[in-house]
């Protein structure tokens, strides 16, 4: 059994200290956001932001959840887009990745090159907008938040490399037993590529959840605003939050503006953070195995 040398212990200790410091630096902004969302507006104006709340108040969350029907509607839009978009993207990405991984298919190399080419060059913003709005008629349509991100070239190539790493003799044996391509994909390739699938699923879910740009370009109907775009409107112009109180009994001046911004941020990042621990055990393995092979 190999014993650790002094240099190995020093490097390991340095790595632990570095990771602990990095974790602290990464956690402090989250703690500040949560603390601000729970802190009284007057205390923030007088003392600034703090890591821990001075006196806990739920005023910001009550405002967001109690009067923010727009927030709840945007939450619903984002959840629908994330779930439907991720499932749709995973379906077409896995089917295409499996087809491109089959060496016996002569078109796999030319089509893989075309996919790779799109990562380097694209048509630009104006042609993209003309196609999506004029020809595909995606303006003010929930499909506008799904179809443009339906397939990602990087995710496709990573998953193709992961499936290519599966021993081809398994597929040959299944073919001898009478399995067709559908059985090879859903009964053999997908169960063996579970780490890669989990990683790509997380990538797609995060991209759908965090996106606001598509809605900014293609959505003008307020009822179809996703959560991120609504929060962008709130954070960039806090008067939007104040205007929500104009029709209520709450005076605009009483709105905890900083707290509302931080509370909406907490409500936004919450679900996607809860998703990560369930996929974390697949994340490193799926990403490294899928990316080291060409």
Image: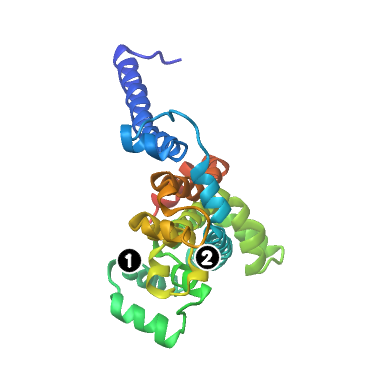
- The answer to whether any part of residue 123 appears in the image is no
Q: Which residue is mark 2?
A: 89
Residue at image point 44% right, 72% down: 148
Instruction: Provide residue 277's location: percent of width, then percent of height.
Output: 54, 40
Secondary-structure class at tag 1: helix
Give the total number of marks visible in the rendering: 2
Any mark on residue 60, and which? none
Which of 259 and 9 lies nearest the eye of the viewer?
Answer: 259
Which of 47 and 122 lies nearest the eye of the viewer?
Answer: 47
Crowding near the residue tagged with mark 2, few <14, some 14–19, many ≥20 C-alpha atoms within 10 Å: many
Task: Using residue 177 as the reference point, say whether residue 26 is left or right of it.
Answer: left
Instruction: Provide residue 193's location: percent of width, then percent of height.
Output: 56, 52
Residue at image point 45% right, 38% down: 34
Secondary-structure class at tag 2: helix
Quarter of the image where one finds residue 177 = bottom right
Residue at image point 38% right, 34% down: 43
The earlier-in-sequence mark between 2 and 1 is 2
Task: Using residue 273 as the reference point, say whether residue 125 is left or right of it.
Answer: left
Q: Relative to residue 86, is residue 293 depicted above or below?
A: above
Quarter of the image where one finds residue 190 = bottom right
Any mark on residue 119, and which? 1
Q: Relative to residue 75, is residue 261 depicted above or below?
A: above
User: Comparing marks 2 and 1, which lies closer to the viewer?
Assistant: 2
């Amino acid at each position: 059994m190999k014993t650790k040398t002094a240099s190995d212990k020093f490097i390991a200790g340095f790595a632990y200290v570095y990771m602990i410091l990095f974790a602290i630096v990464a956690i402090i902004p989250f703690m500040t956001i949560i603390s601000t969302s729970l802190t009284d507006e007057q205390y923030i104006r007088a003392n600034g932001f703090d890591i821990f709340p001075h006196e806990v108040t739920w005023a910001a969350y009550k405002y967001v959840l109690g009067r923010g029907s727009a927030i709840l509607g945007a939450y619903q839009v984002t959840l629908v887009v994330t779930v439907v978009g991720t499932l749709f993207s995973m379906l077409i990405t896995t089917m295409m990745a499996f087809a491109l991984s089959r060496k016996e298919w002569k078109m796999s190399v030319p089509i893989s090159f075309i996919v790779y080419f799109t990562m380097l060059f694209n048509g630009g913003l104006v042609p993209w907008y003309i196609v999506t709005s004029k020809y595909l008629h995606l303006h003010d349509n929930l499909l506008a938040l799904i179809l443009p991100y339906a397939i990602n070239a990087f995710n496709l190539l990573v998953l193709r490399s992961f499936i290519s790493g599966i021993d081809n003799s398994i597929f040959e044996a299944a073919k001898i037993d009478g399995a067709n391509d559908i059985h090879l994909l859903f009964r053999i390739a997908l169960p063996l590529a579970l780490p890669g699938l989990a990683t790509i699923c997380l990538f797609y879910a995060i991209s759908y959840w965090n996106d606001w740009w598509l809605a900014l370009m293609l959505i003008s109907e307020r009822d179809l605003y996703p959560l991120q775009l609504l929060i962008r409107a709130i954070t960039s112009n806090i008067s939007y939050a104040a205007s929500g109180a104009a029709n209520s009994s709450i005076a605009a001046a009483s709105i905890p503006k900083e707290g509302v911004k931080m509370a909406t941020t907490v409500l936004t990042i919450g679900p996607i953070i809860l998703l990560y621990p369930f996929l974390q055990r697949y994340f490193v393995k799926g990403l490294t195995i899928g990316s080291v092979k060409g």
